[in-house]
Image (tube, rainbow, N blue to C red):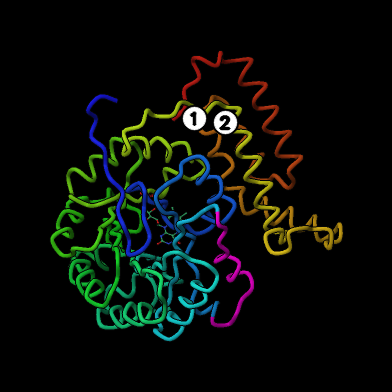
Amino acid sequence: MGGRKTYPGFDIGPVRADVPLFLAPMEDVTNLAFRLIAKRIANPGVMFTEFVSAMAIHHRAHKTLKKMRVMDQERPLGVQIFGGEPHTMAETARVAEELGADILDVNMGCWVPKVCRTGSGAALLKDPELAETIVAGVVRAVKIPVTVKVRAGWDWSLFAAPDLARRFQDVGARMVTLHARFAKQGFEGEADWKLIQEMRKAVTVPLVGNGDVRTPEDARRMIDETGCDGVMVGRAAISNPWQLAKIRAGLTGDPEPMGPTLEQRIDTATEHAKSMIAFEEGLDERQQVTTLSPKERQEAELRGIRALRGQLPLYIKGYAGAAEVRGQLSRVASVQELQDILAEFQKRTEEQTPPEVQSVR
Ligand SMILES: Cc1cc2nc3c(=O)[nH]c(=O)nc-3n(C[C@H](O)[C@H](O)[C@H](O)COP(=O)(O)O)c2cc1C
């Protein structure tokens, strides 16, 4: 594409992000099943797991340990951990490294009360000394690069992130991501990208900007306006890895990929469900599921598909009639049922709308 500006990847210590595009850590979203799909379709520079509780790992909770499962085809992968206690954070970082993480990311952005009450997540923005101690301890505990994801501060009274980021850099953090909102905001209002621009002055390690990047244009504009090295995308990628692929192309200068077609969306939703179930069945750990009883398989199917219910409607969002099947999708209990609902939806949609005028966004 003649002369279009491209945006280079960069190194995070020994790990190369080929493209300056990061899939955000998202609880219940960026699990192994989704990451494998996102990798294949969008191939971002680095993807992050959903956050993993250090306290749960300390108690060897099996379900939480599974969240740190890494497969070779999804590398480079960052495992994100949260906690407010230096020893368990260091211990959990070591477990993540042993399980194959390429990057260890420390969460200092989660604002939900359940997390902050324990002194974890964004609560650390209020305690720079402890935050620094945690990052320093994690850096000492592992050989893989350590990164930190922060919000701007606890509330508007203090833009705490620049001071914190400088501290983290000084104790060995290799990259900082700023979600350009204050913790008190939750997801309200728009992300204030000026905060990212300010933050740029605080650190020399790679800085990743985050908040409200939805399109290739947004991604380029965030880098151009703020001077950050890369962008992290969250919500725009949920059930929509194709959008992530478009954003990738916007940064590499490659032609924007076409589609997806409704058929691709439906196939991917089904694949996503099957993969969720396979991991629920423990396929990733055992390579085969013949040891499960029929009842266990049925339970795993329900657990896997239930965990995906909220995301399924997003696969077909924007199509006429999608809202009507949302209710059905929110109750779906098996792959067969999912396939039936989506097949019926596809049939109706194709009857109504010639494919060339289907518009989705
Ligand atoms: C469903 C959901 C789950 C999230 N879980 C996490 C998490 O586990 N760790 C984290 O650091 N941020 C989490 N976030 C925040 C995102 O990583 C990101 O910072 C935020 O969504 C802003 O980016 P966006 O505007 O591109 O969505 C979550 C966001 C959403 C929507």
Instruction: Locate the N terminus by quadrant.
Output: top left
Report whether the residue tagged 1 is closer than 8 Å to ligand 1.
no
Q: Give the alpha-carbon distance from disc 2 to disc 1, as whole Å.
A: 7 Å
Q: State the residue in front, 336 or 207.
A: 207
- Return the residue nearer the eye: 139 or 280: 139
Query: Which residue is nearer to you in this view: 100 or 218?
Result: 100
Mark identifier at residue 322: 2
Residue 221 position within the rendered picture, expressed as x and y whole percent measured from the top left: 23, 40
Would residue 65 be counted in the magenta stretch? yes
| Residue 141 in the image, given as x and y percentages of width and height | 41, 81
Q: Secondary structure at mark 1?
A: loop
Q: Residue at x 70, y 54 (%)?
A: 278
Instruction: Note whether 120 is above or below 282 in the view shown.
Output: below
| Residue identifier under label 1 | 318
Left or right side of 326 for 154: left
Pick the quarter of the image with the C terminus.
Answer: top left
Residue at image location 43% in from the left, 79% down from the top:
89
Are dots 2 and 1 in contact, CB under 8 Å? yes
Q: Quadrant of ligand 1?
A: bottom left
Q: Residues within 10 Å of mark 1 (few under 14, many from 20)?
A: some
Examine the structure image and report whether residue 202 is included in the region drawn in magenta. Answer: no
Amino acid, disc 1: Gly
- Residue 39 location, x and y as percent? 50, 46
Picture quadrant of residue 335:
top right
Q: Residues within 10 Å of mark 2 (few under 14, many from 20)?
A: some
> Which dot marks residue 286?
none
Residue type at mark 2: give it.
Answer: Ala
Instruction: Please indicate whether residue 238 sits to the left or right of residue 304 in the image.
Output: left
Q: Residue furthest bottom?
A: 87
State the extent of the magenta-drawn residues as a range.
Answer: 58-72
